[in-house]
Image: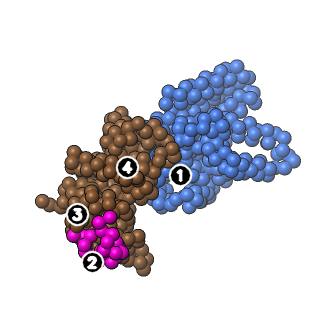
Chain colours: A blue, B brown
Amino acid sequence: MMRSLLIIAAVACVALLLGAVLQPRGYAVRVVCLILLAASLGQCWNIVGGLANQVSLGHAAFFGIGAYTSTMLQIKFGLSPWAGLPIGMLFAALVSVLLSIPTMRLKGPYFSLATLAFGEACRIVATAATGLTGGPQGVSVPFAGNSWLLLQFRGAGAYVPVFVGLFVVVCVAFTLLANGRLGYMLRAIRENEDAAEVTGINTLGVRLAGGAISAALTAATGTMFAQFTFFIDPDIVFSATSISIRAALIAILGGVGTLAGPIVGALVIVPLEELLSAYLSNKAAGIAPLIFGLILIGIVVWRPSGLVSLVTQRRGRT
Amino acid sequence: MTPIVEVAGVTVRFGGLVALSDVSFAVRPGEIIGLIGPNGAGKTTLFSALVGLNRPDAGAIALDGQRIDGLRPHRIARLGMTKTFQNTALFPAMTLLDNVVTAAAVRLPLGAARALARDCLEKVGLGAAADTDIDDLTFPQKALGEVARSLATAPKVLLLDEVMAALTPNEMDAVVATLRELRDREGITLVIVEHHMRAIMRISERILALNFGQLIASGTPAEVSRDPQVVTAYLGQPDASHA
C-alpha cells in the first residue's frame, strides 16, 4: 500500500515537473496530458476489469456520458464543468447499475460482448438524439478565455495540474479499493465465484459496487477529456476502439489488476499512437488499430500478466 | 432438541437426471454426521443444495428453524452454514492468509479480519503456512486451508467435502482430532463426506448413506455398516465394514 502511494506520488511529481519546464503551448506537454488521461482511463477500467476480471469492452458508454453531461449542462444552462462533473459521475454510476441487471450473470466473453454492444448502443443513441447531444456533427465547449472556474485554458500546459489531480484521485481510489475489503472480495470473485459466495460474499452486490465506482471515475475522465479537446462528437467519446478497447488495452498491456499496469500501458500506448499518426497516417491510415491488435495478441500470449510482470513476478499484488 | 438442519423431501434434477430424490433427514446441534455413498450417489449435490449453490426442485431446507432453500449462498453462509469444496477451491492468486482474511472481511474490518484469520489457521494447524502461496501447499494443507477459510465465516454448520482425501493414516488421525476439537470447543456441527471408511466410521456419531440420489440408511456407524442395502450398494462385500 505504501509502495503504491509512492508510485502515484512519483508519477505525479514527474508530470508536474514536465508541465512546469515544457513549453506550455507545445506538442510535448500535450503528450504528457494525453498520457495522464490514458493512464486514468486505464486505471478506471482496472477497478473491475483487473480486480474482478470483468473484461468490459463498453467503458466508452461511461466516458461519453461524462463528456456529454458536463458539456451539455455548460452549453444549455451555463453550468461550470466542476458542477457537471459530479452529475455526470452520478449518471454514469446509475447507468452502470442498470446495465448490470441484464449483464450481471454473464461470464467471461459473454459479459465482454454484452458491454461492447452496450457501448455501441450508447453511441447510436447519442448520434440519433440530436436534441440532447447535438447529434453527429458534435458540440464545441464554448471558450471564454483561461478560467479555473470553467476548467478551460489556452494551451495544454495549464491542464497538467488538473490531469495530475484526476490521475491521483483515480489511482488512490484504485489503491484503497485494492487493499480494502472490497478489493479482497473483488479478487475472490475473480478467482472463484462459487467459493466466494459460499464464504459469504454477495458477489452480485460487490460487482455492482465496483462497477459503479469504475463507471463514475470513467465519466470524470470523460469530462476532463471534453474540457481538453473543446470538441466532442458521439464517434469520438463513445468510440468502441479508441475508448472502450483502448482502456482495456492500456491496462492489459501494462498489467491487469496492478496499480502500475495502466501507467506503464499509457506510457507505451500514447507515444506509439503519436508516432503512428505522425508517420503512417498519410500512407496507411488503418494501420494503427492493426498494430494495437497485434500488440494485444502478443501480450496475451507471451506476458498475460503484462509488462509490469517483467519487474515484479508475484501475482495478484498491487 | 430442535434440529439445527432439517431437510424435508428435497429433490434436485439436472435435466432428466434425478440427482437427489425426496431426501429427508435432520441434524442435531453439535452432531458429527458422516455422509457416505458410492460415486454419483448425490453427496456433493446434497451439499450444494444445502449451501444454496443449486436450488432444490422440491422440498424444504431449514437452518436453525429458518427456511433457507432458495436463498443465495452468501445469505446462507451469513446465517451460519458453509461448505468446503471437493478438490479444494482456495483463491489461487492469494496467500493462504489472504484467503482466510477474505472470508473474515465479509463481516469484520480488515484489522480484526487479519487477527481472526491467523486464529483460524492456528486452529487447523496451519499457522506456519500463513504466507505461503496456494500453489506451494500440499493437498492436505489445501484441504485444511479451506476448513480454516470456512471457520472465518463463523459457521454453526460446516459441510466438509472430502477433506481427508490423500492423507496418510497419521495425518488422518490428526485431522480427525482437529475436527473433533472444533466440535467440542466451538460447538460447530459437522457433516462430513469421506470415501475413506476407517476415518468416517471413527469420527461420525451418525451415518447417512445415499445411493442413486436416495437416502438408503441412517444410524450409528455400526448399524449402517451392517445394513444390507448399504453393504450391497456401497461396501460391496460384508467383510469390508470392519476395515
Q: Which residues are magenta?
A: B223-243
Discs 2, 3 touching: Cβ within 8 Å: no
- Identity, as a three-letter code, of the amino acid under mark 3: Arg
Residue toward you, B44 or B240: B240
Q: Which residue is mark 1?
A: A54
Circle 3 residues within 10 Å: few <14, some 14–19, many ≥20: many
Q: Which residue is mark 2?
A: B228
Choose top left, top right, bottom left or bottom right for residue B152: top left
Tell me how far mark 4 sits from mark 3, CA to CA: 23 Å
As helix, strand or loop, the secondary structure at mark 3 comes to strand
Across and down, in percent, residue A294 comes to 74, 50
Residue ID at (72%, 22%):
A22
Which numbered disc, 4 or 2, marks the residue that appears first in the sequence? 4
Q: Both on one chain, marks 4 and 2? A: yes
Chain for numbered disc 1: A
Residue ID at (57%, 33%):
A167
Q: Both on one chain, marks 1 and 4? A: no
Q: Which numbered mark, 2 or 1, is in the foreground of this view? A: 2
Chain for numbered disc 4: B
Chain for numbered disc 2: B
Discs 3, 1 touching: Cβ within 8 Å: no
Q: Which residue is mark 4?
A: B171
Q: Which residue is mark 3?
A: B206
**Horizontal relation, residue A104 to residue B234: left or right:** right
Residue ID at (36%, 75%):
B236
